Amino acid sequence: MLAMVFVGANSVSAQTSYTDDQGVQYSIADGKATVTGYTGSATTITIPATVNGATFVAIGANAFKGNTTLATVNIESDGSNPSDLLSVGESAFEGCTSLTVVNGYLRKLIDIGDKACSGCTSLVTFSNVANKLVFAQAAYSTSIGTPVKVGKEAFKGCKFQYLANTTNVGELGEGCFEDCTELANNSTSGTTALFTNLRQVPARAFKNCSKLERVGNMSHITSYGDEAFSGCSSLITIGNTANKLFFISKADLGEETLTVGKEAFKGCKFQYVSNATQVSSFGEGAFEDCAMLANDIENIFSFSGATEIPARIFKNCVSLQRVGNVAKVTTIGESAFEGCSVFTTYGNEADIVRFPSGVTAIGAKAFAGCDALVEVQVPWETPLTITEDVFSATAYAAATLKVPVGTEDAYAAATGWEKFTNIVTGIRTIENVENAVTNDTWYTIDGKRLQAEPTTKGIYVRGGKKIVVK
């Protein structure tokens, strides 16, 4: 059926509508055909390469939305002649719960709209390869002049197992693969996702992809959105080194900033994190429930780029032993280390939680459940205000609280600090060092006693005076 549509005075060519004998509806203009709807009842349909003399190039917005009968869409193509399909519009297949296969050699497809296949809970194949979603090939993407764009929640809840040609993807929308619970990897079919053209992983991009084990070549990413990989309970590698989350290097980051959103990696299973020093801010719960996150001598988690350790960031990281380079941190959030049962070191001295003088707030339950604590050192002559549940009962009973000279009584009476059974003196602040009896002992600017004269450049205290070592 062919029908003419109104042509305006400034129109370049007529736009026509056409319905084939399957009930597939098209809009045709400038020699190009777009699927606009479907009125049939068949479970399988075929979209030809040429429609009434026009080249098929697009599936329009809402074209098949809510169709619960359609199971297979064949797009005419072959291995040497890919389909000319360039785009799948917003909500084109949304809610097509019986759809299992969109079959075709779709190597020119560069634009996939928001919710294009969202809720297609039976969809296992979107390509000419079983169980795969295959994006446009580089040769076609380059000739068209744009990388592949995947819209918000485009494939939410789909069931394909593998992704291919991800190196050609330049933009992902929020929640694009959320709840794709079958999305996985295997080493024999080249299916480790390599998103080499991305700079940002948006919110919920892979949330609850519980079988996803690794995502490669992510060392150029400057932003991980809220819940980006939350619930990826099999994810052990992000980057090119096994069992490690590898952030962008300082050289590659340049003048940009690196940010990690709320619960970005909650529940993941990698063991180590590299280049954490480049992160300027972490979201709450960023590594919550990462039970395998640990440390070795080369992989001490470092906060030298951040001023805040947010709430729940390491909650229930039961293998985490230490974090270092915390000199810039001023705030430790609620439940930041709660449940870190083997945690012993905050700072750069083994088995000591040593708070820098710049810390102004420690949230409730920040170290609750940290039962392995050995020693806590504080620099404040006036005890910092905290709640009674910052530390665990075990830590209060077993760990030593070391306080500035002459402040034992103040800490023994201060809420949250008074619960330590063993409070001892020994920490010297700059002020009380300068007022001490003159001697030859050297101290760091924050009051740490040195064993010998310092050889590193900096400001030190000796004999009650500040001394600059050049």
Image (tube, grey):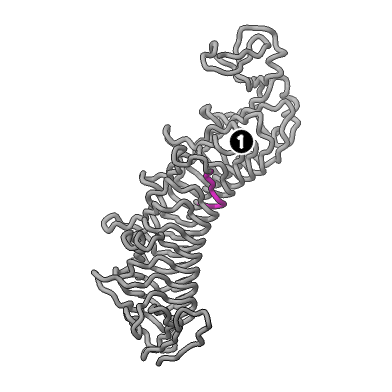
- Most foreground residue, 227 or 390: 227
Which residue ends up furthest to the top in the rendered image? 439
Q: Where is residue 170 shown, x and y percent of the image?
A: 43, 57
Magenta residues? 257-264
Answer whether residue 261 is magenta in the image: yes
Which residue ends up furthest to the bottom in the rendered image? 1
Task: Work out which quarter of the rendered image holds the C terminus and state it.
Answer: top right
- The kind of secondary structure element at disc 1 is loop
- Could you say which quadrant of the image residue 331 lies in? top right
Tell me if 440 is positioned left or right of 295 in this view: right
- Could you say which quadrant of the image residue 56 lies in? bottom left
Rendered view: 47 above or below 284 = below
Rendered view: 98 above or below 343 = below
Q: Where is residue 54 shown, x and y percent of the image?
A: 36, 81
Tell me if 280 is positioned left or right of 110 in this view: right
Which residue ends up furthest to the left in the rendered image? 80
Q: Where is residue 139 shown, x and y percent of the image?
A: 31, 60
Q: Where is residue 150 shown, x and y percent of the image?
A: 45, 64
Q: How many marks overall?
A: 1
Q: Residue at the spot x=64%, y=20% of the render?
A: 426
- Most foreground residue, 393 or 68: 68
Task: Work out which quarter of the rendered image holds the N terminus and state it.
Answer: bottom left
Answer whether residue 37 is magenta in the image: no
The amino acid at mark 1 is: Val
Is there any visible trace of residue 162 in the rendered image?
no
Tell me if 406 is positioned left or right of 194 in this view: right
Q: Residue at the spot x=54%, y=52% of the render?
A: 263
Question: For mark 1, does the 10 Å Cα neighbourhood hold few (<14), some (14 to 19), or many (20 or more) residues?
Answer: many
What type of secondary structure mainly makes up the magenta span? loop
Which residue bears the numbered disc 1?
Answer: 329
